[in-house]
Image (spheres, rainbow, N blue to C red):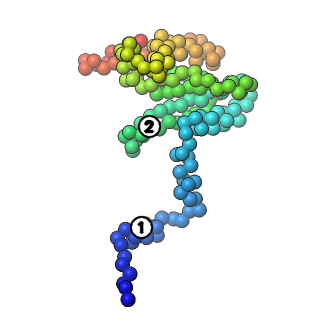
């Protein structure tokens, strides 16, 4: 008669299983939020914004991209619904949705401060995808994005966001 062999992996898994509370949620349900694409999350946020701000002719979605705290190479994008146009900021994309016409358009997209400075310094060697991005960076530097945001909110225009450059002697503000 053969003896049943226990493997370390199986007993470890059995021990882990006994310590975890049982849930009715399966693995596919757990993975659903992570499986949504950028555009799916954007459209879902637009839908929620239209419901929340149904009396507004336009709604805005602000998307912030940042590095994940635990996984150094992973980027995380968070979406926020708004009834007003946000102030321009680094690592931000802003979308405007025309509720009446059902039209979604990008107002601007901005990379990090470091990337903005790099784009400005190397604007002669940009590929096609970066050309539109540099337009938004120039608009940020000139104050045009700040002015656009204030106009969309029916506010008075004030000074724009400054770029910070480190030259090993301290910070220099340009813009």
What residue appears at the point 25 percent right and 18 percent down from the top-left corner?
Answer: 169
Q: Residue 75 has which mark?
A: 2
Local SS, label 2: strand
Q: Residue 148 has which mark?
A: none
Local SS, label 1: helix
Quadrant placement of the N terminus: bottom left
Q: Residue 13 has which mark?
A: 1
What residue appears at the point 36 percent right and 84 percent down from the top-left corner?
Answer: 3
**Which residue is the extreme one toward the bottom?**
1
Vertical relation: 6 (above or below) 140: below
What residue appears at the point 37 percent right and 23 percent down from the top-left corner?
Answer: 114
Image coordinates for residue 151, horizontal then vertical, percent: 62, 14
Residue 142 placement, left or right of 105: left
Residue 128 placement, left or right of 73: right
Crowd around label 1: few <14 · some 14–19 · many ≥20 (10 Å): few
Quadrant placement of the C terminus: top left
Of 102 and 130, which appears nearest the observer?
A: 130
Could one spot residue 152 in this view of the protein?
Answer: yes
What residue appears at the point 42 percent right and 36 percent down from the top-left corner?
Answer: 67
């Amino acid at each position: 008669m053969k003896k049943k062999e226990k493997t370390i992996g199986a007993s470890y898994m059995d021990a882990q299983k006994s310590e975890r509370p049982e849930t009715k949620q399966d693995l596919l349900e757990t993975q659903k939020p992570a499986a949504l694409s950028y555009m799916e999350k954007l459209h879902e946020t637009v839908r929620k914004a239209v419901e929340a701000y149904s009396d507004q002719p336009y709604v805005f979605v602000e998307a912030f991209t940042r590095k994940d705290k635990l996984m150094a190479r992973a980027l995380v994008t968070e979406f926020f619904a708004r009834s007003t146009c946000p102030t321009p900021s680094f690592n931000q994309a802003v979308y405007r949705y025309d509720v009446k016409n059902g039209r979604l358009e990008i107002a601007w997209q901005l990379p990090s401060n470091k990337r903005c400075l790099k784009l400005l310094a190397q604007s002669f060697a940009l590929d096609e995808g970066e050309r539109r991005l540099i337009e938004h960076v120039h608009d940020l530097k000139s104050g045009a994005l700040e002015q656009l945001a204030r106009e969309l909110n029916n506010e008075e225009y004030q000074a724009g966001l400054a770029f910070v450059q480190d030259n090993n002697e301290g910070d220099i503000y340009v813009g």
